[in-house]
Image (cartoon, rainbow, N blue to C red):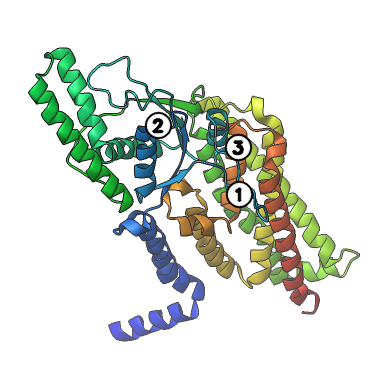
Amino acid sequence: MILPIVRTAVIALRRDRAALALSFVLPVAFFSIFASIFGRSGGNSTPKIAVIVVDQDRSQASSDLLKALERDGSLEVRTAPPAKKNSKERPADYTSATAEAAVKAGDVPVALIVPSGFGAHPISFGNDSNAPQIEMLNDSSDPIAPQMVTGLLQKAAMTAMPAVMAEQGMKYTERYIGAFTAEQRKQMNANLEAMRQIEERNSTQEQGTSGFGGIVAVHARPVVGENKNNPMISFYAAGIGVMFLLFTASGSAGSLLDEAESGALDRVLSSRITMTGLLAGKLTFNTLLAFVQLTVMFLWGRAVFKLDFFNHIPGFVVMGLSTAFAVAAFGMLLASVCHTRAQLGALSTLLILVMSAVGGSMFPRYFMPQAMQKAGLWTINAWAIDGFTKVFWRDQPVSALWPQVAVLVASGAVLFVLARRLARRWEYA
């Protein structure tokens, strides 16, 4: 009797495509996403950290340090903004002010300012207050990038400036121990010259040298979020909020399927209400419902986690309505595609969880490889989170939200048009 029961269950599972998808497709999809993000074994797949370098010193030491940073495969070094399309003019190099503005705008997570006088005293041993400090401007929402850049900066100093480091070591030795004899100084100068020749050959071949130690003085200064309480609360409120809005919108839009199954939809369409009017009404309701849910989420964040909500109400309203409209249209499309509630539940679960993982609702997108970060731009989650980050984290004005608002509104309009075309089957049923 066991085998017939097993065979019957297998046949039932094959017929229930929704259960089949949830049993096999969703686990494989999530495994692939997480393996792509956290299971990278090769260095080529690791996302590079974009860093701005402003060389105010223009010395040989600062030039060598910059070249070493550019050779590092983990960094994407920028000394000037990207050139505009169809423009042959090279943009002006970054200054300390424009570099700080770029970090505040979220263009890069880190900027390094090499001060004047660095070449005269590049290496600091012990507590040397006279050594110029490289200023590191960072966005505190990304705690990983500053630490990695600091380590790579020390590595670049150790591999790119062995002669400078040896010369500085001689100065420190004379300061704390005593002057060298003429013969010792002659021998050290000869060794320094040999080091410089090795550096020149390695620089020509674009290879670093190793085996020399040293320290570069770095002063880290957060320029975004330094005065905020619970800085990541706005990110989680937006990310988790959008994910659950998608579930709510798809479930609410599923009332179309219930009405079609019960025959209520036919009676409604036999009155003066058209299918376009019916869908528009449901879209309006679902948009308002999603906006209210999002408002409750952020108010809870304000009451419990001290989220700075009331100082950002205009930006929140603009982003909240845009996000709610896109989410509601997405739910309408899913309801129009599916024929039963079971299909809607399976398809919505599969798509929403994948969109949330790739779009940044589960963890920040800067953890992801570049290809997956670009793929995330095809999701509602990514654009909504970017917009709310601009509002609550970067304190940008409403006018700076136009890319996110434009994409969300345009996406909602396209999804609603597609839902309307697919809903024709109910008119001719």
Q: Earlier in the sequence, mark 3 or mark 1?
A: 1
Q: Nearer the viewer, residue 248 or 53?
A: 53
Quadrant of the drawing holding the N terminus: bottom left
**Label tally:** 3
Q: Which label sits on residue 59?
A: 2
Q: Is residue 46 left or right of residue 235?
A: left
- Residue 95, placed above or below residue 204: above
Of discs 2 and 3, which sits in the foreground? 2
Residue sitting nearer the eye, 386 or 237: 386
Three-letter code for the amino acid on which mark 1 is drawn:
Ala
User: Toward the viewer: 61 or 189?
Assistant: 189
Q: Give the SS element for disc 3.
A: helix
Q: Residue at x 41, y 60 (%)?
A: 33
Q: Compared with residue 199, is residue 213 higher up or lower down, i.e. above or below?
A: above
What element does badge 2 sit on? loop
Q: Is residue 363 visible?
A: no
Residue named by callout 1 = 83
Residue that badge 3 annotates? 390
Whether residue 403 appears in this view of the structure is yes
394 lies above or below 343:
above
Task: Identify the amino acid type marked 3.
Answer: Lys
Image point (9%, 24%), residue name: 184
Residue depicted at 26% across the width and 29% down the height: 215
> How far apart in space, not on screen, are marks 3 and 1 (Cα)?
24 Å
Toward the viewer: 418 or 345? 418
